[in-house]
Structure formats: structure tokens, C-alpha cells
Amino acid sequence: MGPQFSRRSFVLMALLGLSPLPLRAAEPALSPVPATEVDEAGLLFLRRPVIVFADSPADPSFTRQMELLQRYLPELALRDVILITDTDPAARSALRQRLRPRGFSLVIMDKDWGSAIRKPLPWDGREVVNAIDKMPLTRAEALEKNPAGR
């Protein structure tokens, strides 16, 4: 059993900015992975790809999208997201050949690497998180974790 705290000690700790509960270890930071380094077969049913395509890393839409996702990286990490970037059309990555983006494109996929949502303009990180939460495999995982939620 954990330490016992009285109501008074909770109030005092709250005023001092302390937490009576043990803090969870920090989640590993979610960092973008270049599309040329992605092994789709090794990530199937393990990671949800969020892919940001552009014709150049200097593309204003690409820069804006990466800024919008930055604040939501911890939430995306909790949803098993792999953030993939592809800013070099000449490299002809397997994902670029499969998804055939034109210019900037945001593609959100489920863990089966299907159910793609495509956006031609930058999308707020909160909208990306909400779209992931509505995907079929995400809903199935949520029901497995909490069967009472049916």
C-alpha cells in the first residue's frame, strides 16, 4: 500500500505544488522518422502512421504542420503513432509511391496501414488526435481495455 495522506496534507501539498502520488516515468519523445527509413512490414499492427509529405522541407505547409503536431506529440505517442516525414520526391520512398501525394499532404492511417485520411492543408494536432480516436482499430482497442464501455 502507498503512503497514507490526510485531507490536510493533500491541501498543503497542492498549495506547495507537490504531488502525493508517484509520477509516471516520462514517455519517450516522439520524433519524426524519414520515410526512407520506415519498414512497413515491421510496424504493421504495432504503429499508426501519420505521414507528412511535401516537395521540400522549406514548404510553408510542411513547416506549419510540424509546428501544429509538436504540442500533441505526447498524446500521439500514447496512441502508438509513428510520425513519418517525406520531403524528397526524388528519393521515391515506398510510401510516396504507394500513396502518391501531390505537393503537401497529411495522411493518417490506422495500425493496419489502411483507413487513410488525407488532408491537402495542415491540420491542428487536436484534430489529428480526434481522427485517430475515431478509427476502427482504435475503437476496438479501447473496448478491449474497457469492456464496460460497450
Image (cartoon, grey):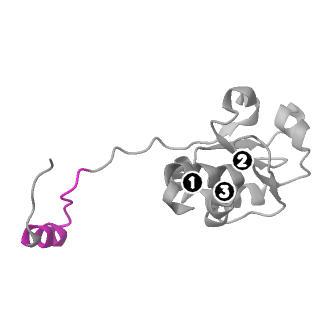
Magenta stretch, residue numbers: 8-22
Q: Which quarter of the figure is the C terminus placed in?
A: bottom right
Residue 56's spot in the image, x, y percent? Answer: 81, 47
Q: Which mark is residue 40?
A: none
Q: Is residue 92 magenta?
A: no
Q: Is residue 89 at all visible to an observer of this figure?
A: no
N-terminal of the two: label 1 or label 2? 2
Residue drawn at x 71%, y 53% is 136
Q: Which mark is residue 132?
A: 3
- Going by the numbered disc 2, the residue's amino acid type is Asp
Residue 144 left/right relative to 68: left
Residue 140's spot in the image, x, y percent? Answer: 63, 51
Q: Which residue is mark 1?
A: 143
Tell me if label 2 and label 3 are in contact, CB under 8 Å.
no
Q: Residues within 10 Å of mark 2 (few under 14, many from 20)?
A: many
N-terminal of the two: label 2 or label 3? 2
Residue 125 left/right relative to 100: left
Residue 62 left/right relative to 120: left
* Mark toward the viewer: 1 or 2: 1
Residue 124 left/right relative to 142: right
In the image shown, does 141 or 133 lie closer to the viewer? 141
Q: Which residue is mark 2?
A: 110
